[in-house]
Amino acid sequence: MKRLATTLFVSAALLFGAFRADACSNVLVTRGASIDGSNFISYAADSHQLFGELYFRAAMNWEKGSLRKIYDWDSGKYLGMIPQVRHTYQRVGNMNEHQLIIAETTYGGRAELADTTGIMDYGSLIYVALERAKTAREAIEIIVDLANTYGYYSSGESFSIADKDEVWIMELIGKGFKAGKDGKNENKGIVWVARRIPDGYICAHANHARITTFPLNDPENCLYAGDVISFAREMGYFDGKDEEFSFTDAYAPLDFMAMRGCEARAWSALNILTDGQFTFIDENGQEVTRDSYDYIDYAMGYDKTKRFPLFVKPSRKISVKDVADVMRDHYEGTPMDMTQDIGAGGNALPYRWRPMTFKYEGKEYMNERAIATQQTGFWFVGQNRKDLPDVIGGIIWFGTDDAATSYLTPIYTNTLECPESFKEGNGSMLEYSATSAFWMTNRVANHCYKMYDIMAARVREDIDAWENSMIEAVKECDAEAMALYNEAQTAPRKKIRRNDKAQKVTDPYLAVKKHLTDFSVGHAQEIFNHWVDLETFLLLKYVDGNIKAQNPDGSFKNNGYDKGKPDGITNRAYTDKWIECVVKDHGEVIEMK
């Protein structure tokens, strides 16, 4: 995900090898690996220019011959029009009414494969596919057809795609521009490969193509473009045997930044969910287990030969909460831990403001880029549940801003409306709105950045309490919705007349959808209101670097106060690393002699 204000491919950040400061992260979990038989996909849409809002489009019927305008999702540039289908499905964020989920991360790839004459950008491929597909395989087919028919405008992309049964990772890139006699592009379209995540396994990707070699004769588990290998040969990217062909090595060759800035995030996500033990199927078809730290030199950019597997088994059954918490990772407990070096300041802040790279005495250095980052626009964990009907089963656990200090709240994908705090147009990056979740979560996050080690931990208590309570609340809502669903199943279908010319069947599940809407909208407003109060609490408790004592009920009043002055003030010491560095740098001046 990029959301740049300039035309694609102009910025060097889009070319492979340049660090993607606004990069994204995905985690994919299959039914057999989850605690409740759901498929999960997580996504953080990270960009300094992306406003956090929930894209809501109701299902629609279209007149024959209608056209759909395509705008580049990153820049808003108008790209062209494509024929509209007669019926489009409802989509709520990156999920649709049939529980289909599509997320992405951009890997860029070879710059010469850009085609600025294409109509379909990666964001439009996602949202058009959600409007037209019910299954992951249908979505793959639609994405390929759209890109090949109308041309692909964006750079290399990895998609996460899940329906109720299957989870796929799909990687694609354009074929560049080659002018024909008519001046049009003879290379229009994409080369691509898609692999199904084996049930019981998990996957992650973070702005680098992860599919290497793949089975050439297994359409149940692997789909690919007929020319994905021959085109690489034609371009001089590959000259070995077909079975040795690696998609990423051909179309997105590794360098230090691809490993350290991108692959490290995928490694960290899998490291957390496997408790450091990567169990996978090796090249001989045998299940093996290796310590995740066998691959640490690859993740840190030191050794290209130690690439970690595409799919691994988790050490335990994974929940929505587990995946949400992975999205809050700052490499804690690893050699890349962002809280431990002097860059974290005196309060263990796991963020580094831009620029991400710097030079000193002729050498170039970089700050880490973890999964959780300050520039997140929105993030989610999409959950589809096969054991429930579509009208109830799909939930997008949605949040805005930095995942480490923001909440997820459940939004059913058959809701009738979007919560006000997430609604499109409720504020922007240049327009503050007091009712916008994006701005309120930013206010809380920016409070925490001044005393991160203590304030973020306090916010996390409220996050955990909310998300755990919502997991239980969803179970109750499901049961109530199923009762309404069963009533609708047995109720006679009513019809209404319009102008005595056409008949329209009323939605038999309207009561179900109203119930899900009340739940989704009501709880989104409840947690938003709590975050408003939380920001006030943080200001009162931690103003000017102080820590005020509280009553057991959380208040500050009547606790040794004299005319509104707090009696219980304490201060948090700076970290040992900060103290050590300050003394070494300036100790001769500040020493108390």
Image (tube, grey):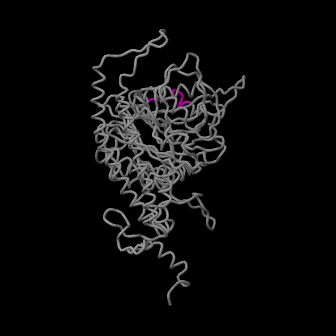
Q: Residue visible at 49% across and 52% down?
A: 440
Q: Residue visible at 35% across and 39% down?
A: 284
Judge by depth and name the residue closer to the eye, 392 or 577. Answer: 392
Taking the image as shown, residue 210 lies to the left or right of residue 278, namely right
Taking the image as shown, residue 64 lies to the left or right of residue 485, namely right
Instruction: Classify 588 as above or below 418.
Output: below
Instruction: Classify 504 as above or below 135.
Output: above
Instruction: Classify 83 as above or below 364.
Output: above
Residue 320, position in %: x, y?
35, 44
Residue projecting furthest to the front: 563
Image quarter hosting the N terminus:
top right
Judge by depth and name the residue closer to the eye, 405 or 105. Answer: 405
Judge by depth and name the residue closer to the eye, 103 or 237. Answer: 103
Residue projecting furthest to the bottom: 593
Q: Hey, which quadrant is residue 6 in on the image?
A: top right
Instruction: Classify 223 as above or below 439.
Output: above
Report the magenta residues as a range.
223-230
Residue 459, position in %: x, y?
40, 58
Judge by depth and name the residue closer to the eye, 305 or 183. Answer: 183
Residue 226 painted magenta: yes
Residue 82 painted magenta: no
Residue 577, position in %: x, y?
45, 72
Residue 490, position in %: x, y?
27, 20
Q: Is residue 205 visible?
A: no
Taking the image as shown, residue 476 lies to the left or right of residue 203, namely left
